[in-house]
Image (cartoon, rainbow, N blue to C red):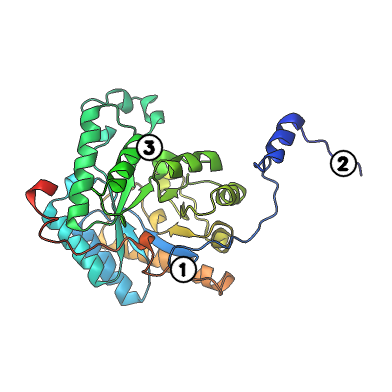
Amino acid sequence: MTDVTMSAGTARDWLSARGYPFTDNVEFHRSDGEFDGGGQFGVEIPAVNSMRDLEIIVKLLNDQGVRVTRFNETLGSFLLSDAELSDMFALCRENDHGIVISLGPRPEYDTKSAFYRTGFGLEMGRQINNSDGIRACVAEALRLAALGCRGITVYDIGVLRVLAELRTDGLLPSDLVFKTSSHCMPTNPFLARIFAENGADSITLAHDLGLPMMQEIRRLNPGLPMDVPTDVYRTKGGFIRFYELAEIVQIAAPVMLKMGASVQEHPYDPPSETRTAERVRRVARGLEMLDRHLPDKTTITRRSRQYAIPAAPSDERQGPAAR
């Protein structure tokens, strides 16, 4: 049998000479990366958006002996009062869980984002188009940090860069983690690098990204943790990739597995207690499959910044100036 000639040969040769990916037909290689503090993987349950949601899911996890790393909130920090956020942070500390809170000011809430609400506008993602919105994001980040938050989800790369400068200047804590939302859509290693260069401590990959591209993102961004949706809401495709969990951990480490979303239709639907219980069962099932196919895996430790365990707020941090 004669060899098959690959098309776009000049492009292939140029990319190959620079060590860049040029095909999805690749052999998989085990990543030797770990989180700071050790461990190949962690587990994040998304869309835990209130104290009530958090109380229910923490109790279910404890009752069933299911261990996860952290939760994330998705509706927006500005919808939650200081008191509710403080209660959520305290509950996470008491149960050794982290939590990542999303910034609230974004186009779906903004009177200045009429284009965003059109079919074409949705394609721009949740980018902020006015300085008032950027100022509000900065104010929310300062408020969250003062209350003890140590993980923030960012939707806009410009806001990410500003928050990174605030952290460098000491106005935000050095252990505060910035993760990009899946709405930022880092779909290849070059986009991933841009987010990292602008302050991202981890990136959430596009939901349906294949194993070859995950491996290339890891290869060209060796120190950047990745958050990988492993099962998704029906409105986002509804797929479940539990049979790939072992491969994902091996090629993408350090990696945070986002689990439990596939039992819901939409991320903004308030889950009932029954639906939350099903989410916990779905997470347990995924971890059972991971245990079977990769028994030698190692788990993130609470020493890692990526754990995002809330800090106990000081009186100074909670003062009016911080808010």
Q: Which residue is drawn at 44% across and 58% down?
A: 256
Q: Which of marks 3 and 2 precedes in the sequence?
A: 2
Q: Residue at x 23, y 25 (%)?
A: 112
From this viewpoint, is residue 199 visible?
yes
Q: Which residue is drawn at 29% across and 59% down?
A: 99
Question: Which circle, 1 or 2, is nearer the viewer?
Answer: 1
Rendered image quadrant of residue 149: bottom left
Q: Which of marks 2 and 1 precedes in the sequence?
A: 2
**SS of the residue at dot 1?**
loop
Question: Which circle, 2 or 3, is nearer the viewer?
Answer: 3
Side of 24 where 265 appears, left or right:
left
Q: Position of residue 152 (x, y in %)?
A: 30, 50
Rendered image quadrant of residue 183: top left
Residue 95 drawn above or below residue 154? below
**SS of the residue at dot 2?**
loop
Picture quarter with the N terminus: top right
Marks 2/3: CA–CA distance: 44 Å
Q: Mark 2 points at which residue?
A: 3
Q: Name the residue under label 3.
A: 157
Q: Position of residue 106 (x, y in %)?
A: 27, 36
Q: Which of 89 and 111 is in front in this view?
A: 89
Q: Which of 189 and 44 is in front in this view?
A: 189
Rendered image quadrant of residue 252: bottom right
Marks 1/3: CA–CA distance: 28 Å
Residue 38: which disc?
A: 1
Going by the numbered disc 3, the residue's amino acid type is Ile
Pointer 3 local density, CA inside 10 Å: few below 14, some 14–19, many at least 20: some
Marks 1/2: CA–CA distance: 44 Å
Q: Position of residue 125 (x, y in %)?
A: 38, 33
Labels 2 and 3 touching (C-beta < 8 A): no
